[in-house]
Image (cartoon, rainbow, N blue to C red):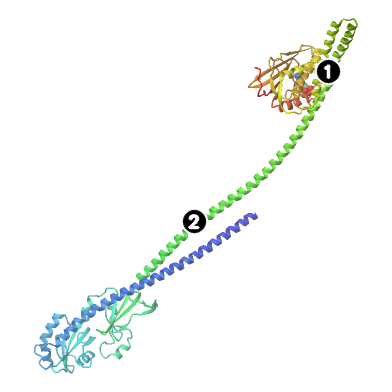
Amino acid sequence: MQAQLRKLAAMLNALQTRIVAIAIFLAAVAGFSAAVGVFGYMSALDQLEQRGQSDLALASDRLTGELQRYRELAVLMADHPVVAATVMGNPDGAADLLRRTADKTGSLDILIVSGDGTELSSATDGDPIFHGALPYFERAKDGAMGVYHLVHDRYDQRTFLFAAPVFSEEGPVLGAVVVVVNVDAVEAVWRGANPTVFFTDDLGVTFISNRSELVFSARDVDVVPRTTSAEYSSEILKPFMTHSVSEWTGLPLWSVQDQPYVPETALHLSLSLPVIQMTGEALLNVAPARTLASLQAGVAAAICLAFGAMLFFATERRRTLAEANAQLESAVAERTVELSDINAQLRQEVSERIATEAQLTKAQSDLVQAGKLSALGEMSAGISHELNQPLMAIRSYAENAEAFLERGKTDVAGQNLSRIAELSRRMGRIIRNLRAFAKQESEGLTDVDLGGVISAVLEITEARTKASNVTIEWVPPARPIIVRGGEVRLQQVVLNLVSNAMDAMEGQSQPQRIEIDIDTVDGRVELYVRDSGPGLDEPDRIFDPFYSTKQVSQDGMGLGLSISYGLVQSFGGMIRGRNHPRGGAVFTVTLDPSNSAEVAA
Ligand code: ADP
């Protein structure tokens, strides 16, 4: 439970860290893209200004170029002899000249004005006006080129006027030629073109523009009529477009209201045009620049976000892998601990088993000794009988030999003595067997002649077999059959089998028979001991320690077969007991043949 809570807390912590990192990243992206946007806007405005300057210069050039023609016309006309004659008081042919010239040059009107401002002749038929005191005429009278613009009552439209002085031959100014230009006609060519361009005079009134709505808009409507003498009647003047001005990197940006044909936000540029006494102004739409800048900012943000997302997913992937790895490692560590525990347990068990085995081996060797002692006891009766008999015979042979010697029958005495010698050899053999049997054998495995072992056992039991009338069916092999084992221990095993067979058949009326045979099966030596007794009561239990069905008189301890089992196993062999189908018990001892010895077929 606690571990789960800890895990949950760690997860929340990691989530919080991630959210903070993402927020910081987003803020950085926002800052970066804003910077890109600002920079883009600045450079776009820069470019816009350059383009606007040239556009404005171009528009101004076109206007001044157009007007220049009329200015030059005025100068040329001033030198015309008819004009000079008119100024001198002879207006013949003047009206005709003026009309033709006006038609050819597209001028609205051409006037010849006397030195006092009186109109002497004109191309049109309107009422003559008095030009005295009007600025253009004043300039012309001063011998300079008079330039002026106004809404003339006579023409009822915007006009541009160029007044050129007419000099007398002596020098003083006699009058002036005034060329009246129709502004509408000049303006018509570039109406509606981009950008928004307008030309304002020194009163702040927009006089010419490619946006007709702007014409006659005055920056200060109230000031104009008071400062000017005649140009505009206050009815035609209207307020200048409502706008606020802000600065952006030193460039004036106008926010214009309620002007359908003027950009809402525009860069304002101006150019002074002294030739026509006006200021050219242009309003450049900054919306494309803004769009471009926001596009650049958007692209920058998108790239940053894409990059960030890639980075995020890569980090997430690495984190997931690291977590999986950590889980795996902890699982491995847990499993290792478990395995170490199991290993320690196994070691403990192994050492316990080794100890138990040692105990068992000890118990087994004790039992072997006990078995030997019991066998010794068993044999002692037979042996004492066996030894007693030759001893009695030796005694009588000795006594006989003594008598024969007294009688001088040395040859018969010698026969008796040699019988004595043979009997004592036999006794010696019996005693040697007994000694070997009593001695605890602890040597390892050696090569043992199985046939010899069987003969030795039959010799030991000979007395009993004879007494009990047991037939031993045993044909000693022609050649030694050498097996791996311990001679005395093997004797003990065979003796036990033969003794058990005799015990089983004891007192039975049928012929008592023990068959002993040696065979070779699959390269191993097999010894069979079969009897004609009643067979095994419980074949499964015969090798159990202390299992015995024997009478008290037979002195059975139930250890003989279990000891034999252990001994044969220690030779690397095997012992089995079963009932023969035709009656009696049969025991099989399987042993390994000696490596060097030949095994009898
Ligand atoms: P013990 O001879 O002291 O009884 P063993 O271990 O030698 O102990 O024999 C165990 C038992 O196996 C015997 O008591 C007997 O019941 C049975 N047994 C062994 N050999 C034979 C045999 N040849 N025929 C019948 N029973 C046998």
Q: Nearer the viewer, mark 1 or mark 2?
A: 1
Indicate whether 138 appears above or below 330. Answer: below
Q: Amino acid at mark 2?
A: Ala
Q: Which mark is residue 314?
A: 2
Q: Is residue 505 above or below residue 223?
A: above
The quarter of the picture where the N terminus appears is bottom right
In the rendered structure, find residue 434 and report the number of the disc placed on it. Answer: none
Query: Is ligand 1 within 8 Å of the beta carbon of the residue shown at mark 2?
Result: no
Position in image of residue 18 (x %, y %):
53, 61
The residue under the point 49% across, 64% down is 25
Q: Does residue 411 appear anywhere in the picture?
A: yes
Q: Amino acid at mark 1?
A: Ile
Give whichever of discs 1 and 2 has the lower sequence position: 2
188 versus 325 height, above or below: below
Residue 570: percent from the left, percent from the top? Answer: 72, 28
Residue at point 48% right, 66% down? Answer: 28
Q: Is disc 1 placed on a helix, strand or loop?
A: helix
Residue highlighted by disc 1: 383
